[in-house]
C-alpha cells in the first residue's frame, strides 16, 4: 500500500507508521493523518488533526465507535448544534437526531418523527390500531384491524361514516325505507308509519291503520296474495282479480281479465272482436306493423277508424298489402319492431305501407327501381342490377355503413347484416326468416324450417319449435314417452320407451294390441284353449267358450265352467266329484250355499216310505240359498228327489240375479 512517502511499502497491516509521521501507530492519536506534534486539545485521545470536535471531548476514535456525526456533515454531534441538519437547533429540536418539520401530534416532548406513541394514548405505534387517533380502549367494531377512532367506515359496510345512515350497523345498500335519514338496519320504525317494527304487522310497508283483511297476522299492505288466487301480488298481473293462469297477451302490467286492451295495440279488445281481428295479438296479420298503427291511431291520434286504404274489402289491419302497390306491408315497414313507426321515405306524412308511390314519381312502389328517389324515367344505366341511377347501388341509403350493393337490406339499417337463413334478404326485411316457403305472418315457427307446418297439439306453435308437441305438460326432451300423444301420467305398462297412449303393444309380449287376445296382459303364446277369442291368460273359463265372460258370483270363475254358478267358490271344491261344488251341493256335509244360515224362505217336504216323512228345507233369503234335510226317525230314502229340488231352487235363484260383466280371472 502507499503510505504517502513516495515509496512502495508494505501494506497497512504490517506498517508500523501508516501516516509516515514518525509516530508509531500504536502511539499515534491520528494513525492515518500526519500530526507529528500529536496535538489533542480536548484530551479525548483523538488528535486535533483527525478529531471532528477538536475542542470538545468525543473520543475514542471512530474505529472504536466514537466521533459520532449523525448528519455526516464533518462536525461531530457533541459540537454540532444541529445534529440532524434540519435547520432546527438541537436545543429546540423535538427530534434532535431525526430531521423533521417539528410536527408533534400529541404535544409531548418528542416530535412525531421520533415518537413511538404518536397519539399519546398509551399504545405504542406498533401495537396501536389508530396510530394518529387516541383510542386507549382499541375498539374495532368491524374487526378490520383499524380502530373505530380512525376508521372512516366503522361498521365495514363500504360506506364512509360521513355518508353512512347507520354508522354502527352494516348496511352497504344504505336502504332507508321511510327516507328519514336513518338506515333500515338501525331504524326501529323502518316504514315510518308510527308503529314500531316489533308491533307492526307490515314492518316494511307503511300501514298506520294496521289493516289485515284475512286476519293472518300479515297486514294488507304487505300481504303477498290479497286476492287469494295463489299468485303473490308482487307477480300478480291483476291484483284483486283472481287469475291463476296470469294470462297477459301484451306483456304489460295488466293481465287479460283486467286489461281493456289485452294485446296492447291501442284498440279496445271489444272493437277488435267486432272487426274480426285477433284480440290477443298486437299484429293480427303478422306483417310487423301493429294493429293500432294500421287501424289509424298513429296517423289520426284518435280512436281507431279501421281504414281500408286500397279499397279491396280488407281493413288494413288484416291486409298484407294495405296500399295495393305490389309490395307487402312487411317489406315497406322498415323494420320488424312493432313499437317503432313504419317507414316514411319522403317524409310526406304518409307511411310507405299506405303510400302506393312513396317517392311521388308516378311509379308504383312495387315496380319502382328507386322506391325512395323520384325517377319517373326509371333510367337504369346498369340493367339487371335492380337499381335505377337515381339510387346508385354504391350509395348507402339506410345509413348502416353497408353500401346498397351488397347490403342485404338496403332500405333497412342492419350494419351486422344478420341473415339467419342465408338467402338474399337480411333478417329485418325478410318476410320468410327461415326460408321454408311459408311467409312469417302465417308461419307457426318463424325461425325453424317447417314447410309442412305440422302442429300436433293445434296450439298455433309448430312442432319444429314446440318443446311440448302434445301439450300434455311433459316436455319432449324430458323425455315424453309419447311426444305426439297427450299422456300427462306417462303410464307405461311394459316399462319400455313408449307410453301406453302410443304403444302398439302395451303389454310388451310381442303381439300388437289390435290382434292380441289378451290386450294389456302379456301372453306371447296367445294360447286360447276354448277358441273364444280370449287368451287363456285372461279367460275365466279356459276350457269353455264364453266370450262374454259372465261370472254371476264374482269368484273369477266364469259361469260357463263354475260348478256353483250362483255361489262364490273360487277354489271350485267338489268333495263327492258329482260336478256340483261343495258350496251348493246338499249331499256334501256342511253345504249351505252362499246365503248361509237361517230359514227365511219356504219349507218343502217329500214323503218317505213309512214313518215321518223327511223334509227338505229351502232357504231363498239373504244373498243366496241353503238347504238341509230333516228326518225325525231316519235318513231320507229319496235323495234324488232332494237333489232335484235343490237344483231347481238354485236355478230359480240364479235367474233372479242380475248379470255381471265378464272380467279377467285373478292371477
Image (tube, helix red, strand yellow):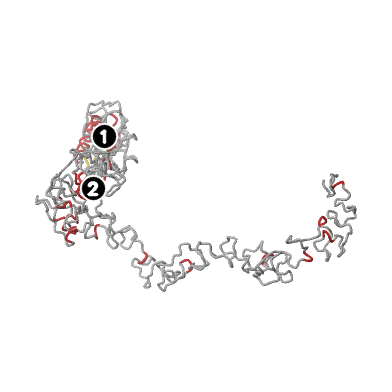
Q: Position of residue 259 (x, y in %)?
A: 24, 60
Tell me what residue is drawn at x 85 percent, y 47 percent: 13
**For mark 2, what is the residue?**
411
Give SS at disc 2: loop
Most distant residue in the front direction: 6
Which disc is residue 301 wearing? none
Quarter location, residue 532: top left
Q: Position of residue 632 (x, y in %)?
A: 28, 38
In this image, 32 relative to 113: left or right? right
In this image, 386 relative to 23: left or right? left
Q: Position of residue 240 (x, y in %)?
A: 28, 63
Quarter location, residue 476: top left
In this image, 360 relative to 413: left or right? left
Q: Quadrant of the C terminus?
A: top left
Q: CA distance from mark 1 to mark 2?
A: 91 Å
In front: 446, or 42?
42
Q: Is residue 572 above or below residue 108?
A: above
Q: Is residue 627 above or below residue 264?
A: above
The local crowd at label 2, few if under 14, some if 14 to 19, many if 20 or more residues have their Cα within 10 Å, is many
User: Quick one: label 1 or label 2, which is nearer the N terminus?
Assistant: 2
In this image, 167 relative to 509: left or right? right
Q: Position of residue 486 (x, y in %)?
A: 27, 42
Quarter location, residue 452: top left
**For mark 1, what is the residue?**
564
Q: Is residue 377 above or below residue 263?
A: above
Residue 95 shows up from this direction: yes
Residue 630 shows up from this direction: no
Q: Are marks 1 and 2 in contact (CB under 8 Å)?
A: no
Give SS at disc 1: loop
Amino acid at each position: 500500500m502507499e503510505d504517502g512517502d513516495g515509496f512502495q511499502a508494505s501494506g497497512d497491516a504490517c506498517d508500523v507508521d501508516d501516516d509516515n509521521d514518525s509516530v508509531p501507530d500504536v502511539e499515534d492519536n491520528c494513525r492515518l493523518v500526519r500530526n507529528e506534534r500529536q496535538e489533542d486539545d480536548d484530551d479525548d485521545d483523538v488528535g486535533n488533526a483527525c478529531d471532528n470536535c477538536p475542542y470538545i471531548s468525543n473520543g475514542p476514535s471512530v474505529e472504536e465507535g466514537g466521533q459520532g456525526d449523525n448528519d455526516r456533515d464533518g462536525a461531530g454531534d457533541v459540537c454540532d448544534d444541529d445534529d440532524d441538519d434540519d435547520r432546527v437547533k438541537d436545543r429546540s429540536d423535538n427530534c434532535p437526531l431525526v430531521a423533521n418539520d417539528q410536527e408533534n401530534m400529541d404535544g409531548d416532548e418528542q416530535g412525531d418523527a421520533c415518537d413511538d406513541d404518536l397519539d399519546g394514548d398509551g399504545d405504542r405505534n406498533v401495537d396501536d390500531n389508530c396510530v394518529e387517533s387516541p383510542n386507549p380502549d382499541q375498539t374495532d367494531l368491524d374487526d378490520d384491524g383499524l380502530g373505530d377512532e380512525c376508521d372512516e367506515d366503522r361498521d365495514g359496510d363500504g360506506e364512509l361514516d360521513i355518508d353512512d345512515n347507520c354508522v354502527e350497523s352494516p348496511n352497504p345498500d344504505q336502504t332507508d325505507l321511510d327516507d328519514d335519514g336513518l338506515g333500515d338496519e338501525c331504524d326501529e320504525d323502518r316504514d315510518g308509519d308510527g308503529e314500531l317494527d316489533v308491533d307492526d304487522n307490515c314492518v316494511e310497508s307503511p300501514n298506520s291503520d294496521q289493516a289485515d283483511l284475512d286476519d293472518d297476522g300479515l297486514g294488507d299492505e304487505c300481504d303477498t296474495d290479497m286476492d287469494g288466487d295463489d299468485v303473490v301480488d308482487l307477480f300478480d298481473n291483476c291484483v284483486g282479480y283472481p287469475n291463476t293462469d296470469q294470462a297477459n297477451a301484451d306483456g304489460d302490467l295488466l293481465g287479460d281479465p283486467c286489461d281493456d286492451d289485452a294485446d296492447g295495440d291501442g284498440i279496445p279488445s271489444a272493437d277488435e272482436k267486432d272487426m274480426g281481428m285477433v284480440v290477443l295479438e298486437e299484429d293480427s296479420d303478422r306483417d310487423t306493423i301493429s294493429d293500432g298503427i294500421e287501424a289509424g291511431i298513429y296517423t289520426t291520434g284518435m280512436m281507431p277508424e279501421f281504414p281500408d286504404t286500397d279499397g279491396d274489402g280488407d281493413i288494413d289491419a288484416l291486409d298484407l298489402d294495405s296500399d295495393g302497390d305490389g309490395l307487402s306491408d312487411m317489406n315497406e315497414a322498415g323494420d320488424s319492431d312493432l313499437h317503432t313507426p313504419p317507414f316514411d321515405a319522403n317524409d310526406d306524412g304518409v307511411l310507405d305501407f299506405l303510400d302506393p308511390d312513396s317517392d311521388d314519381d308516378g311509379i308504383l312502389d312495387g315496380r319502382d327501381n328507386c322506391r325512395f328517389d323520384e325517377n319517373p324515367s326509371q333510367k337504369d344505366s346498369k340493367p339487371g342490377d335492380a337499381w335505377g341511377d337515381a339510387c346508385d347501388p354504391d350509395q348507402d341509403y339506410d345509413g348502416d355503413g353497408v353500401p346498397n350493393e351488397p347490403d342485404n337490406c338496403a332500405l333497412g339499417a342492419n350494419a351486422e347484416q344478420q341473415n339467419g337463413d342465408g338467402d338474399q334478404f337480411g333478417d329485418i326485411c325478410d318476410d320468410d326468416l327461415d326460408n321454408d316457403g311459408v311467409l312469417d305472418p302465417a308461419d307457426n315457427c318463424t325461425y325453424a324450417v317447417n314447410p309442412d307446418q305440422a302442429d300436433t297439439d293445434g296450439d298455433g306453435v309448430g312442432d319444429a319449435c314446440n318443446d311440448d308437441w302434445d301439450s300434455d305438460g311433459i316436455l319432449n326432451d324430458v323425455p315424453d314417452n309419447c311426444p305426439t300423444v297427450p299422456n300427462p301420467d306417462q303410464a307405461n305398462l311394459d316399462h319400455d320407451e313408449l307410453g301406453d297412449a302410443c304403444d302398439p303393444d302395451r303389454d310388451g309380449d310381442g303381439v300388437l294390441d289390435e290382434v292380441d287376445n289378451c290386450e294389456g296382459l302379456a301372453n306371447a303364446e296367445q294360447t286360447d284353449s276354448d277358441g273364444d277369442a280370449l287368451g287363456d291368460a285372461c279367460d275365466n273359463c279356459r276350457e269353455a267358450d264364453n266370450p262374454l265372460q259372465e261370472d254371476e258370483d264374482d269368484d273369477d270363475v266364469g259361469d260357463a265352467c263354475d260348478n256353483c254358478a250362483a255361489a262364490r267358490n273360487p277354489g271350485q271344491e267338489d268333495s263327492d266329484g258329482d260336478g256340483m261344488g261343495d258350496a251348493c251341493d246338499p249331499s256334501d256335509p256342511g253345504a249351505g250355499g252362499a246365503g248361509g244360515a237361517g230359514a227365511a224362505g219356504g219349507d218343502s217336504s217329500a214323503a218317505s216310505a213309512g214313518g215321518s216323512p223327511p223334509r227338505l228345507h229351502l232357504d231363498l233369503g239373504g244373498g243366496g240359498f241353503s238347504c238341509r234335510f230333516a228326518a225325525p226317525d231316519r235318513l231320507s230314502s229319496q235323495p234324488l228327489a232332494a237333489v232335484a229340488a235343490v237344483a231347481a231352487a238354485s236355478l230359480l235363484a240364479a235367474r233372479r240375479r242380475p248379470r255381471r260383466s265378464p272380467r279377467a280371472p285373478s292371477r
